[in-house]
Amino acid sequence: MIPPGQKIRDSFPRFGLSAYANRFPKNTDTLAIVIEINRGVTIEIEDAHAGLPRATLQADFHCVTTWTYPDAVWSGVKLVDFFNHHIKPRLNENTQLAGAVFCAQDGYKTSLPLEDCLNESVLLADTLNNEPLSIEHGSPLRLVAPEHYGYKNLKHLKRIEFYTTMPKLKRGLNAFLDHPRARVAKEERGRWVPGWILRYVYRPLIRSTEKEFAESMSKRRDARKS
């Protein structure tokens, strides 16, 4: 069943905020990641998947701008398994984490409450539709959280910061556009206004945003050939 306000499309474009259209990851060869706990303990992990069981997930991908790409097949490791292996052993019994901030190689950041992070459907993915992740879709590693809008599914993941008290990531208009949870079923497209209103704000932006990101990707390919 398609969630409220969404429309199916048969293609999966590179997409995002315009400020990130011309930003690309520097590392596409390894699954290295840095973990930080409460601005104290820092852990550098050479391979985010090492020693953990792989998982495959088939799920629809829902962009907040109202398009949905159905039945994407992702593969990687569950974030809950990663957490239990790398984070939980380093916490004392009184530590109550509130959530995590996810940081991308291109400078983008987003966050989720811990209960959402540890949902069994959340992956640290390195493949899409049985192929290694492309630059368009988050190479080399991305967060996949299918119950949340696409802006929570951060691409080019390089760092995860866990906190007992969550920091304020964004202010002003950026804060308005970034719901703390962004759950698709509840149409949490942004803060302070009903999600259905934002359908009509976002939909006119789809075509121009898709074009901008496609042109940027084309320029990158041309530059790498020259």
Image (cartoon, helix red, strand yellow):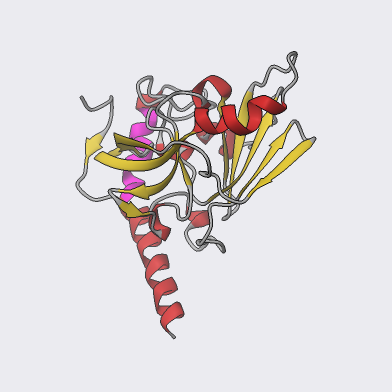
- Where residue 76 sits: x, y (%)? 42, 42
- Where residue 117 sits: x, y (%)? 52, 27
Quarter that holds the C terminus = bottom left
Task: Please identify the quarter of the rendering in which residue 186 is found.
Answer: top left
Q: Is residue 122 visible?
A: yes
User: In this orientation, which residue lies closer to the viewer: 56 or 158?
Assistant: 56
Quarter that holds the N terminus = top left
Task: Please identify the quarter of the rendering in which residue 147 is found.
Answer: top left
- Where residue 106 sits: x, y (%)? 57, 55
What residue lies at 23% left-to-right and 28% top-to-bottom?
Answer: 2
Q: How many marks?
A: 0
Q: Which contiguous range is marked in magenta?
A: 197-206
What residue lies at 35% left-to-right and 25% top-to-bottom?
Answer: 196
Task: Please identify the quarter of the rendering in which residue 170 is found.
Answer: top right
Q: Does the segment drawn in magenta span residue 200?
A: yes
What residue lies at 71% left-to-right and 28% top-to-bottom?
Answer: 90
What residue lies at 51% left-to-right and 55% top-to-bottom?
Answer: 20
Q: Does the segment drawn in magenta span residue 171?
A: no
Magenta stretch: dominant secondary structure: helix
User: In this orientation, which residue lies closer to the viewer: 105 or 91?
Assistant: 91
Relative to residue 109, is residue 128 drawn left or right?
left
